Image: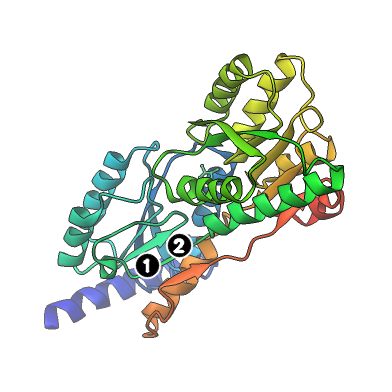
Amino acid sequence: MKKILGFAGAVLMASLAFMGCNEKKSAANSGKKLIKVGYAQVGAESDWRLANTESFKSTFTPENGYELIFVDAQQKQENQIKAIRDFIQQEVDYIVVAPVVETGWETVLQEARNASIPVILSDREMKLSDESLYLCWVGGNFLKEGQDAVAWLDAYLKKLGRDGEDINIVDLQGTIGASAQIGRTQGLEEGIAAHPNWHLIAQQTGEFTQSKGQEVMESMLKQFDKIDVVYSENDNMTFGAIDAIKAAGKVPGKDIIIITFDAVKEAFNRMIAGEINCAAECNPLHGPRVDEIIKNLESGTSVTQKKQYVTEGVFDQDNAQAVLPTRQY
Ligand code: GYE
């Protein structure tokens, strides 16, 4: 105890000396211990992801009381597992994970539990045999996003007077096994099952990236003459698909109805330009939400909500122009 007090005293003295030559007051130099947070991020595959990273980096700052250890796992689960093990080694106070895929996490989460480090999930979910291996989760409702997009398509086809026609749909899927892919794909498949005239003619992953989205769309366009709808599970794949559609001499948004997910600013620009018909929103700004959870825990308030879904909307060419100035990402 004496030793700890001695050490704390030394830290305080050093901090006071530091503060003396630095006007700026912050948690970093007020002598308060920074909360050490390790964030195992999926990667940098999309605009959505970059906005999510920025949200964490701008929230988890020394001024706000944090030391952030940020790891970009390059869309590989094995890199995230390694990052979590490194966080445990570095004795972080909290581990935050945006899991690339849903399954395969039990062992490493058990290791975090053995080290008494709380794990908070953000963005995508995990499917675990023991839900108590993580504290809580905050993110988008991917199934609802898919269902909302399907409801939009249903209404749009009615508006066009095409609801009685055969409609050929292709699905550009996200990373297979990611909860964002699983929920959005399920939303579409439910829609297909409910509409006998909707036909899912192709379904393939574009890994949530622009280049893969373009490549997969190119091959689908070669394979099928009549594609009525592209259901693309994120914006960047959509941007790639639009390039492929234009290169094939077709007009995106007119010859082919384009539905996208995320609704980043560029998707709004494309709706205004007429190239995208509908964007189902997915909010990436989870930094402040996770900050609030951690601050509550630090002040002794326990987590009451295991899962926190973020509210999300659906946008189209009718409201894109009006909504764009209000968008944050
Ligand atoms: O839709 C996509 C990103 O998990 C919700 O991941 C996220 C998804 C998002 O790569 O753009």
As shown in the figure, which amino acid type bears the numbered disc 2?
Answer: Pro
State the image quarter where residue 312 is shown. Answer: bottom right
Residue 31, compared with residue 219, is above or below; it is below
Q: Residues within 10 Å of mark 1 (few under 14, many from 20)?
A: some
The answer to which of 209 and 300 lies nearer the viewer is 209
Question: Of the residues shown, which amino acid type is indicated by label 1?
Answer: Leu
Q: Mark 1 and 2 residues: CB-CB less than 8 Å, in contact?
A: yes
Indicate which disc residue 326 carries. Answer: none
Dot 2 beta carbon under 8 Å from ligand 1: no
Picture disc at residue 62: 2
Question: Which residue occupies the foreground of this view, 243 or 167?
Answer: 167
Q: Which residue occupies 66% across, 50% down?
A: 149
**Which residue sits at x=52%, y=70%?**
25
Looking at the picture, the colour scheme in use is: rainbow
SS of the residue under disc 2:
helix
Who's the residue at 59% across and 45% down the image? 192
Q: Quadrant of the N terminus?
A: bottom left
Residue 19 falls in image quadrant:
bottom left
Per the image, the residue denoted by label 1 is 34
Q: Residue at position x 78%, y 33% from top?
A: 253
Where is 97 relative to 6, above or below? above
The image quadrant of residue 140 is bottom right
Marks counted in the figure total 2
- Across and down, in percent, residue 106 comes to 22, 56
Q: Is residue 89 visible?
A: no
Q: Is residue 220 left or right of residue 81?
A: right
